[in-house]
Image (cartoon, rainbow, N blue to C red):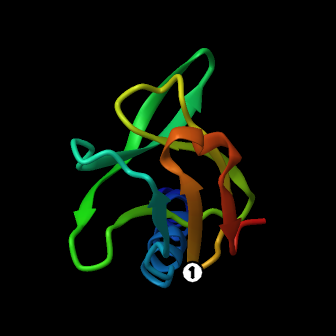
Amino acid sequence: MHKLLLLFVLLPLMANAQSNASKQPAQTVTIACRFVERPVYVDSFFLYETIGLGSRIVSRSTLRVSDSTFLLTVPASPTPRQYGVGTNSPAVLAKLWVSNEPEITMWANFNYLDKGRTVGSP
């Protein structure tokens, strides 16, 4: 009886271990932010996730000097999720919908982030 009980306890645990081992590694989505009229003093950019009335920083980026682009990465999601892109102040954000695209490009005037255009976002 004890052997049968042990079998019923260990069998689901072994099946769960096998399914976890066979999962693919998490994919990431790269967000390339390109700006017009970027102030000289801005050298970092943030990706925020909205949580109720607040927000938290999901990703940070520094300026890529070669082509003046900010690169942000976020884990891919099977369903679209809304993120905000902006500087230190979460009050001025450009809204992005991110799902499982390989890359999203955002073009915007730095003074009007909320009016920016995206390529590759749902």
Residue type beneath disc 1:
Pro
Q: Is residue 89 above or below residue 10?
A: above
Q: Is residue 113 above or below residue 30?
A: above
Left or right: 25, with 103 as reference point: left
- Residue at the (44%, 72%) spot, across then down: 17
Asked whether 4 or 121 is in front, the reply is: 121
Which residue in the rendered view is the most extreme toward the front? 37
Residue 64, percent across and down? Answer: 25, 69
Residue 61, percent across and down? Answer: 29, 56
- Residue at the (74%, 59%) spot, across then down: 79
Query: How many numbered marks appear?
Result: 1
Q: Which residue is mark 1?
A: 102
- Residue at the (25%, 61%) spot, across then down: 63
Quadrant holding the N terminus: bottom right
User: Local crowd at mark 1 within 10 Å, few (<14), some, or many (≥20)?
Assistant: some
Q: Is residue 6 above or below residue 21?
A: above
Residue 44, percent across and down? Answer: 27, 48
Asked whether 9 or 75 is in front, the reply is: 75
Quadrant holding the C terminus: bottom right
Can residue 80 be spotted in the picture?
Answer: yes
- Residue at the (51%, 58%) spot, across then down: 9
Residue 86, percent across and down? Answer: 46, 40
Asked whether 81 or 16 is in front, the reply is: 81
| Location of residue 121 (image quadrant) | bottom right
Mark 1, secondary structure of its residue = loop
Can residue 98 be spotted in the picture?
Answer: no
